[in-house]
């Protein structure tokens, strides 16, 4: 299930484009809700638990038990939307929302938080959703990792779209770091990049390799502020083209090289390895291979860091996000991440969880997305806007409730003895001893 950020009733056109389909008109409400419809709607309420959510139906009726002060009202605009949601809540609710067949009124992020909590508490709901997830993921697609086609699906939809709501400095599409809560997203992204560079103990003149460099902002930051040379790999054509242009504009193209290629083809020897936001697309079956590449290219006294969305325990990706937003993506549990290190001579030095920092990052992104929603709608359509609103809002709720985590894992070769004796080096103004 996803969530809409609007406060109050939202407006959608009568004709929308279904995902992967031809234009069609939204389903007509049909006959007034009957006893079976209301019984099924109550089952949906039971599915999400005692969460303070109210459901209303296409004829204006509310489903008992009524909530005195609901977190939000979920309004099904036609009978088929209700039945489709019950058949596959995690996938079909999102599609109905994107098409305007489900409207949400009230505290919309709060609605999804309540639903997440309700589902996690309810044994019957948990069993039902496990069955649905097994059915949706029986091909184990998310365990295969993202190929180039999946990456292009998400990242090559246009740099201008992302520029509207990401930070204006480095176009970082990953968790920021807010040591001071009142920071802007630009300040927090700079703080994140500095935080990672301190963990890697970067020094001028070192050679760094980055796997999955996004729009290239972190590579430029390392070169400009820490004096290193960077070789950055990415398989998104749009992002690499953008990154190369930015490097030329800032006079850093002699210190930063962007390579349109997969991490598997990294060659050379480097003082540091870093990957921010790529592991979610690698797939668990490829973790030992990733570890072998790192072990091969990282110098004996070098340091590596992997920054990734994760979970407390293995769990499939949300079906709607996996199908509509991130095909092939999989956020791993820490135990699964160990398959990177354990088959290879690598030792984990430090693990930090930035879950609440990612929730705040997403809140900042969502606010900026809403500010540009009219322009995005003019360039795309209403379905696209509602899809991304749902994705960003649902992600806020997932990190707030702990359904998702954000791990930074620092590591080195197992025989590296040149290690700091405390973590003080990770903070501004303190050099490693």
Image: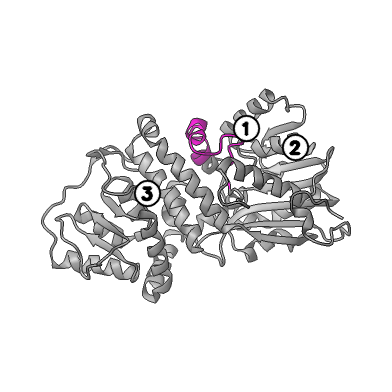
Q: Which label sits on residue 85?
A: none
Residue span colored magenta: 152-174
Residue most extreme to the bottom? 123
Looking at the rendered image, the disc whose residue lies closer to the viewer, 3 or 1, is: 3
User: How far apart are labels 1 and 2 at the CA level?
Assistant: 21 Å
Sequence-first tag of 3 and 2: 3
Q: CA distance from mark 3 to mark 1?
A: 32 Å
Q: CA distance from mark 3 to mark 2?
A: 37 Å
Pointer 3 with pointer 1, Cβ within 8 A: no
Q: Nearer the viewer, residue 388 or 367?
A: 367
Q: Is residue 289 visible?
A: yes
> Of residues 23 and 402, which is closer to you in this image?
402
Residue pictured at 18% horizontal, 66% vertical? 38
Where disc 1 sits, the SS reads helix
- Res. 5 mark: 3
Of residue 426 and residue 122, the one placed in the foreground of this image is 426
- Name the residue: 36% across, 50% down: 4
* Residue 225: numbered disc: 2
Proximity of marks 3 and 2: CB atoms separated by less than 8 Å: no
Residue 157 is inside the magenta segment: yes
User: In the drawing, does residue 50 fall left or right of residue 232?
Assistant: left
What residue is shown with label 1?
240
The 10 Å Cα crowd at callout 3, few under 14, some 14 to 19, many 20 or more, is: many
Residue 368: x and y in percent read 46, 40
Q: Secondary structure at mark 2?
A: helix
In this rendering, would 418 be left or right of 175? Answer: right
The answer to whether mark 1 and mark 2 are in CB contact below 8 A is: no
């Amino acid at each position: 299930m996803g969530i809409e950020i609007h406060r109050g009733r939202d407006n959608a056109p009568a004709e929308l484009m279904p995902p992967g389909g031809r234009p069609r008109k939204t389903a007509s409400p049909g006959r007034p809700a009957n006893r079976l419809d209301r019984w099924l709607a109550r089952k949906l309420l039971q599915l999400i638990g005692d969460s303070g959510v109210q459901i209303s139906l296409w004829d204006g009726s509310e489903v008992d038990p009524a909530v005195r002060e609901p977190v939000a009202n979920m309004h099904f605009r036609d009978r088929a939307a209700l039945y489709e949601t019950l058949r596959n809540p995690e996938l079909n609710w999102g599609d109905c929302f994107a098409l305007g067949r489900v409207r949400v009124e009230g505290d919309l992020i709060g609605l999804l938080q309540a639903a997440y909590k309700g589902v996690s508490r309810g044994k019957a709901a948990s069993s039902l959703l496990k069955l649905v997830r097994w059915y949706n993921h029986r091909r184990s697609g998310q365990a295969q990792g993202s190929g180039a086609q999946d990456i292009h699906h998400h990242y090559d939809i246009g740099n201008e779209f992302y520029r509207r709501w990401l930070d204006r400095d480095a176009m970082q599409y990953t968790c920021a770091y807010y040591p001071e809560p009142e920071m802007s997203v630009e300040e927090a992204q700079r703080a994140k990049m500095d935080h990672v560079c301190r963990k890697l103990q970067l020094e001028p003149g070192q050679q760094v390799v980055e796997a999955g460099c996004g729009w290239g902002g972190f590579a430029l930051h390392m070169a400009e502020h820490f004096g290193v040379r960077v070789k950055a790999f990415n398989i998104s054509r749009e992002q690499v083209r953008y990154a190369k242009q930015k490097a030329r504009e800032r006079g850093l193209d002699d210190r930063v090289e962007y390579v349109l290629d997969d991490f598997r083809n990294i060659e050379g020897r480097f003082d540091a390895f870093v990957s921010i936001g790529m592991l979610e697309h690698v797939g668990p079956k490829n973790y030992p291979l990733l570890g072998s590449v790192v072990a091969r290219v990282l110098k004996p006294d070098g340091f590596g860091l992997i920054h990734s969305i994760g979970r407390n325990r293995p769990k499939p990706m949300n079906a709607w996000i996996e199908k509509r937003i991130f095909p092939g993506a999989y956020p791993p549990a820490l135990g699964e991440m160990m398959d990177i290190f354990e088959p290879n001579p690598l030792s984990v030095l430090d693990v930090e969880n930035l879950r609440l920092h990612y929730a705040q990052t997403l809140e900042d992104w969502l606010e900026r997305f809403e500010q540009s929603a009219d322009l995005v709608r003019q360039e795309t359509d209403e379905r696209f806007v509602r899809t991304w609103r749902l994705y960003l809002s649902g992600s806020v709720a997932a990190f707030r409730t702990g359904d998702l985590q954000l791990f930074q894992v620092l590591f080195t070769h197992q025989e590296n003895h040149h290690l700091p004796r405390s973590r003080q080096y990770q903070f501004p103004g303190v050099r490693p001893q």
